């Protein structure tokens, strides 16, 4: 096979996928799908995609599709992923992996049963700056990591989603749908979360049933501790922030600005150094390239189903802590 055929489903976030998915010389977008017929046909013409449809069943039936990229609303991820795996397609599913732990477990089991690749699109792991933080956490530049702070800050007042699904408590919890970015980033940098204790309040987004500002204190398996924050009604610009403390230094940065702050024990502990950051524009292309390479070389994706499930389990432990007012252990056995 000269090229792996990619189908993209859900052309909201999927439109960004479409712009970058053809970057790999051994993969090509051969089909796209969205319920908005005019929109999907316009995208087909603009990007010269061979096939466009409003039916997910059409995508699953195509023999030229080996990879399905699922970029639909959160509540459809489980159903669509399992259906694709069952007909022999590898799946890249957008974050969050699913709505709850039970759905994640079902997806993990189906991937194991079929032997197909399942990857969760936690794009932060492919941002050059966050990749650099990860490298410094592992190569000794920052020493031994012992504290991490991450946050997902995004005002949802004007982006309810089609039919208002982002405000529907049956289809989305804001800590699962948004903070999964921050949870995954923290887990990637310092290891699995083992216990959480959370607080929340509700001041900015009355249409949303759940708390619109949540913080979680976290214990990690390797001994590090940290704090994860999510805000879905904040009166400020969108941002994913990260701060990692190690025994040799501290790095602070985000995914939207062009420089970070760095302090290293071996230089000057009393003054921040400004560290220029690379642009984030190639992250989706790098994500697709990684997944294609995993399929071609039969290797495990950076964020496989098990890793994705652990992030959702951490999110739900936070939600449980909000409800009961005490610490909650995190499930990691998937």
Image: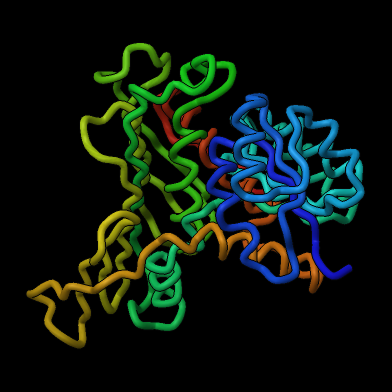
* Residue 24 rendering spot, x and y as whole percentages: 66, 68
- In this rendering, is residue 326 above or below 96? above
Looking at the image, residue 188 sits to the left or right of residue 276; the answer is right
Residue drawn at x 46%, y 77% is 138
Answer yes or no: is residue 313 visible.
no
Q: Nearer the viewer, residue 106 or 314?
A: 106
Question: How many numbered marks are there?
Answer: 0
Q: Pick out the residue farthest to the left.
A: 270
Quarter holding residue 303: bottom right
- In this rendering, is residue 179 above or below 187? above
* Residue 272 rendering spot, x and y as whole percentages: 13, 72
Q: Nearer the viewer, residue 196 or 203?
A: 203
Looking at the image, residue 9 sits to the left or right of residue 204; the answer is right
Q: Pick out the residue farthest to the front.
A: 45
The quarter in which the N terminus is drawn is bottom right
Quarter holding residue 70: top right
Q: Nearer the viewer, residue 209 or 255?
A: 255
Residue drawn at x 84%, y 70% is 2
Quarter holding residue 228: top left
Looking at the image, residue 24 sits to the left or right of residue 111; the answer is left
* Residue 324 rendering spot, x and y as whole percentages: 45, 22
Answer yes or no: is residue 327 visible.
yes
Residue drawn at x 55%, y 35% is 12
Q: Nearer the viewer, residue 240 or 221?
A: 240
| Colour option used | rainbow
Residue drawn at x 33%, y 77% is 142
* Residue 54 rendering spot, x and y as whole percentages: 73, 28
């Amino acid at each position: 096979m000269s090229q792996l055929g990619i189908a993209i489903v859900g052309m909201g976030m999927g439109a960004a996928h479409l712009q970058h998915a053809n970057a790999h010389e051994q993969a090509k977008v051969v089909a796209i799908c969205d319920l908005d017929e005019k929109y999907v046909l316009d995208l087909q013409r603009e990007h010269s995609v061979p096939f466009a449809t409003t039916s997910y069943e059409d995508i699953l039936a195509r023999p030229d599709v080996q990879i399905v990229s699922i970029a639909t609303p959160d509540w459809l991820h489980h159903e669509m992923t399992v259906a694709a795996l069952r007909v022999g397609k590898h799946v890249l599913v957008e974050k969050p992996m699913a709505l709850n732990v039970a759905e994640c477990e079902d997806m993990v089991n189906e991937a194991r049963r079929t032997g197909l690749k399942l990857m969760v699109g936690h794009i932060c792991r492919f941002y050059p700056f966050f990749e650099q933080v990860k490298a410094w956490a592992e190569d000794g530049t920052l020493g031994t990591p012992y504290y991490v702070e991450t946050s997902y800050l995004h005002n949802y007042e004007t982006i309810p989603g089609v039919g208002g699904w982002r405000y529907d408590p049956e289809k989305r919890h804001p800590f699962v749908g948004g903070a999964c970015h921050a949870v995954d980033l923290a887990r990637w940098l310092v290891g699995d979360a083992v216990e959480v204790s959370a607080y929340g309040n509700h001041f900015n987004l009355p249409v949303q049933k759940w708390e619109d500002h949540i913080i979680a204190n976290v214990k990690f398996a390797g001994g590090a501790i940290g704090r994860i924050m999510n805000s879905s009604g904040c009166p400020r610009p969108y941002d994913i922030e990260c701060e990692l403390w190690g025994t040799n230094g501290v790095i602070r940065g985000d995914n939207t600005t062009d420089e970070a702050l760095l302090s290293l024990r071996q230089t000057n502990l009393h003054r921040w150094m400004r560290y220029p950051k690379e642009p984030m524009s190639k992250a989706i292309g790098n994500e697709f390239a990684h997944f294609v390479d995993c399929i071609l070389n039969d290797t495990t994706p950076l964020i496989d189903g098990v890793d994705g499930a652990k992030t959702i389990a951490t999110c739900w432990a936070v939600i449980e802590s909000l409800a009961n007012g005490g610490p909650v252990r995190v499930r990691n056995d998937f």
